[in-house]
Amino acid sequence: MLLFGKEDQDDFASSVERVSPLKRAQSLVVAFSLVLGAGYFLQTTLAANISINSGASVEFGQGIQVTAACSGSTPLTLTPMADFANTSGAGTYKFKSLKLSGIPIGCIGSDFTFSAFDSSTSTALPIFNSSSTKAVVHYSSGGFIRGVGGTGITVQSGSGEFTITFATPVALSGSVHRVTIETGSHTDFTCLSEGNCELLGAGPGGGTIFYYSATPFTCGVARNKLCNYLEVAPDGWNGGVDPLLHGCYGSGAGSGEGSFIFGEGAYNSVRLETGCTDRFSLGYDLNQTADRVVKRYSNAGYSDWFIPSKPELNELCKFARGQATGNTSVACTSAGSLASGFRAAPYFSSSTTENMKYRWDIWFNSATETYLHGYDDQQAVRPIRAF
């Protein structure tokens, strides 16, 4: 663990003292409140001082040099900042944000964890939301992003630096006497564990959430679950561009017509997989059909991927072409451009007719719907999952 300030139990620490000019600032607050009346007045302020080893003071808003495990001898600059919220006749200074700069590329892959402490205990103070005591930032290959437990903070990423801002700061700046920095290996998390799954954000299965409905829809292989999201597998899910695969000949025990209902892609996919028969006579292996390939796919610990039903494929087409998803009554069109990773080709759906011999598909380059022999024609495949 690395702190800024003097050494304390093998940690570099510094104390944050109350500023005597605070009272004068509060007097100004009253003056402002007389002019402004009720409501809020918000401004950035230098709310407290940080004592360094020599006893000299550096105000909030000024940088302090620190080191971290991943930075070696390279000094980092930590700049804590406070905000003052003025209400009618009152006001408080709170630890609002901090900036860390001078971060070397050797820290890529690390998590930075920040905590704040008062002057008398070793218990970390809540610093944002109502009870969160740690703010974590991850240095990914693409820049700085929120880490585990990051709901409630925003991260502004720059070149070798980042700024954390707390949406709802909790800690009074006058109570903060010590701020700690820890660096360590990255902790993986999902939007489900964080409770902040977002449309077009990262899904728990390592893909992208391309559809969201506030009203749950029926989902699952047995059509006995409720879901709100659809997630598409990442580009390169099968080791390269989306594969062109055969369907199957549906004359087995599970054959029948595949549902055209939104949310029943998983149900269709299981029936396709159980209904397929060996088609070596047509020149391809049953184990390499679209249904079997998707059934074997697993990512980020999830193996519940499936081929979308026709209306689910329509939403995926809209996503692939940069169109708004969410309204299943709106058809995909040729507007926009096809996103990288998707083929300008027909994509399989799991909606079928005539004992699963024919499948509906959508050409992602033109948004045209067609109806083909699933076992004769090779079509592109991109798995999705519902949750």
Image (spheres, rainbow, N blue to C red):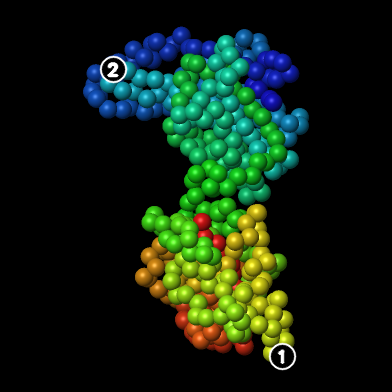
Please state which of residues 7 and 162 is positioned toward the viewer in this rendering.
Answer: 7
Distance between the Cα atoms at labels 1 and 2?
Answer: 86 Å
Q: Residues within 10 Å of mark 1 (few under 14, many from 20)?
A: few
Please state which of residues 158 and 322 is positioned toward the viewer in this rendering.
Answer: 322
What secondary structure is marked by label 1?
Answer: helix
Asked if 255 appears above or below 101 in the picture, the reply is below
Q: Is residue 308 left or right of residue 70?
A: left
Asked if 210 appears above or below 355 in the picture, the reply is above
Q: Are marks 1 and 2 in contact (CB under 8 Å)?
A: no
Kindly identify which residue carries mark 2. Answer: 89
Kind of residue at disc 2: Gly
Please state which of residues 290 and 49 is positioned toward the viewer in this rendering.
Answer: 290
The residue mark sitting in front, 1 or 2, is 1
Residue 21 sits in quarter: top left
User: Residue 376 placed where, x, y %?
Assistant: 62, 88
Asked if 63 appears above or below 290 in the picture, the reply is above
User: Residue 221 placed where, x, y %?
Assistant: 54, 65
| Disc nearer the start of the sequence (1/2) | 2
| Residue 63 seen by the camera | no
Kind of residue at disc 1: Ser
What secondary structure is marked by label 2?
Answer: loop
